[in-house]
Amino acid sequence: MSLLVVVAFFLSVREVTSKCPPSSGIYLMYNGDCYPNGSYFYDDDIRPEQLKCTLPGFTLNGGEWVTPDGSSVCCSTDPLRCDVVSAPNATISLYIPTGQGISSSDDGWYKCCLPTSCSNPSTNIIFANIFRWGQIEDTTVDLPSDVTVLPQTYTLHAIKIGHQNQLNTNYADWYYNESSGTSTKLCRGYNDEYSCSRGNGMKVNYGNGRYDYTLTLTWNEENITSGVSNNYHNHVYIFHLEVGLVTRYRYITVKVPATAPSSLTVVNKTATTITVSWTTLDSSDADGYVVNVTDSDTVQTVQVEGNSINTVTLNGLRGGTTYSITVRAYKELLGPASSAISVFIQCHEEGIYLQYNEICYSNKSYFWDSSVNAVTEAISCVLPGTSLTTGQWVRVDDPDHPVDCNSNSDCDPFHCTSVTSPNATLNLYLAQGLSAEQEGWYKCCLPTDCSDPNTNIIFANIFRFAEIESFTVADFPSDMTVYPQEYKLNCVKIGFYLYGIRMSINSIALVNYANCDDRFNNYCSGTALVSSTNTIRYTVAITWNGMTVSNGSISQSTTGDQMYQC
């Protein structure tokens, strides 16, 4: 539906105040209440109750009311009359005599000038809208409480005042004004009915001819409720009111930035923080910014209030993680996102560490050979803030023959790449199959080789097939004074998906499973996935009564320390 409107209104609200102190300057009074500049008055209300315009402490000297067409109100002729009070407070009271009414040309904005006429540039001026039938007193919007997230929901309000009989309401409609110039009807009001085809609406009766026509909409970056298209520009709405013989329109705009901030850049980063900056938009295009930082499973949102601020520090991050960061501007709603930047932060700010697949690993971690057999799957040994000189990887059982980073053989199946600065880094990966003789413990030395007593050292176990990553006791009894006592054994296996597992005390098996398969969640009884593929924890509950240890129906007599095997 196409709709062309060439009507302008003051965006003012009829606000009643209980007092009119002299310090308030010129004011309007009706029925004992004060009203501010730009208030609305139904013509029936000032027939014959007077609308007073008063300037405290001044003597009237040519003051006047001026009609919408710019002529002075003649106080002695119809349709508007006025009474004057010269002192001590200059006052001109405007009213419509009983039985009289205003015409369409008399409907609109009046101004009162005191104590002198409106031609005096030093006079005091206040405006009042005197209308027939009905008027749109105001249009407002309830904005989202959280401007940082999408989708965003907001509610439009149009306040109709005037004639109390709803059967005289021919139109009370909301439209969305498309950027192309066309308009889409969202809600229809007729007589006492009101319904919305897009969004949700309701009509609230405040009494005395005052109604609130609401419309609640949700925007998801591309569409406003039910497919009204909007790709990041201001949302412009029109409320159309027709009551009796008059037609009114009012526009309201919900402001949205049309563009994203540019030049998103990392300024600084630590093991737990990233500081970013961006180029701000013009002050008219943004009230603030929202920065989003995400990794594989978390989202952090930071709101930056104020257009001039273009830097923020993102806290509480995890070392050894790659984050995706974007920034958006906001006005009343959230604007488009900038291009994302990818930022990796170190596991530690200082001290040597291992990193694999963007995850940090501590000293003496285990790595399955099948997972480190490509340059893109290398184990990284890193020393932050240090330049690489002669660092190296060395097999612990063969310290005299460090890994040759540039060639491989059956005796040395690895290759490695390096980064000299700002963080000394050696990346180790398999260039061919790992033999039984070459599996086991390797140490990394940075920034110098392992012969330097002052170098930094960290260990990694590179194994074939499968390995026991840890074997621990957990959940000891809280009361050590009574029997029986219960605790748990936890054996963590990593590596190949087909395996068997046995846990025993001395030569007695407490559990014994074969052909366990991790590929299809076909775990053996008692196992649970720990953190990543093919990393399985097997738990056995043990009961000790002072004489024997048992697991279900299996028991073993024992005295002294208990030695378990996995």
Image (cartoon, rainbow, N blue to C red):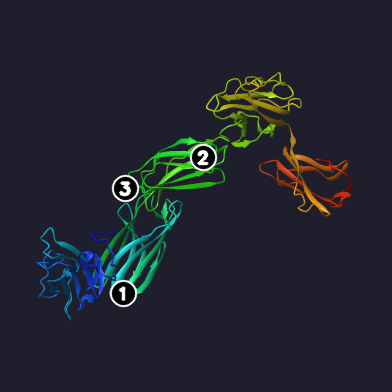
> Between tags 1 and 2, which lies in front?
2
User: For mark 1, what is the residue?
Assistant: 209
Q: Secondary structure at mark 3?
A: loop
> Between tags 3 and 2, which lies in front?
2
- Against 369, is 295 above or below? below
Q: Amino acid at mark 2?
A: Thr
Q: Residue at x 66, y 43 (%)?
A: 531
User: For mark 2, what is the residue?
Assistant: 273
**Quarter of the C terminus within the rendering:** top right
Q: Residue at x 44, y 53 (%)?
A: 220
Q: Secondary structure at mark 1?
A: loop
Residue 95 percent across, percent down from the top left: 17, 75
Residue 291 percent across, percent down from the top left: 45, 45
User: For mark 3, what is the residue?
Assistant: 284
Q: Residue at x 67, y 41 (%)?
A: 533
Q: CA distance from mark 3 to mark 2?
A: 31 Å
> Between tags 3 and 1, which lies in front?
3
Residue 518 percent across, percent down from the top left: 72, 43
Q: 187 or 494: nearer the eye?
A: 494
Residue 325 percent across, percent down from the top left: 48, 41
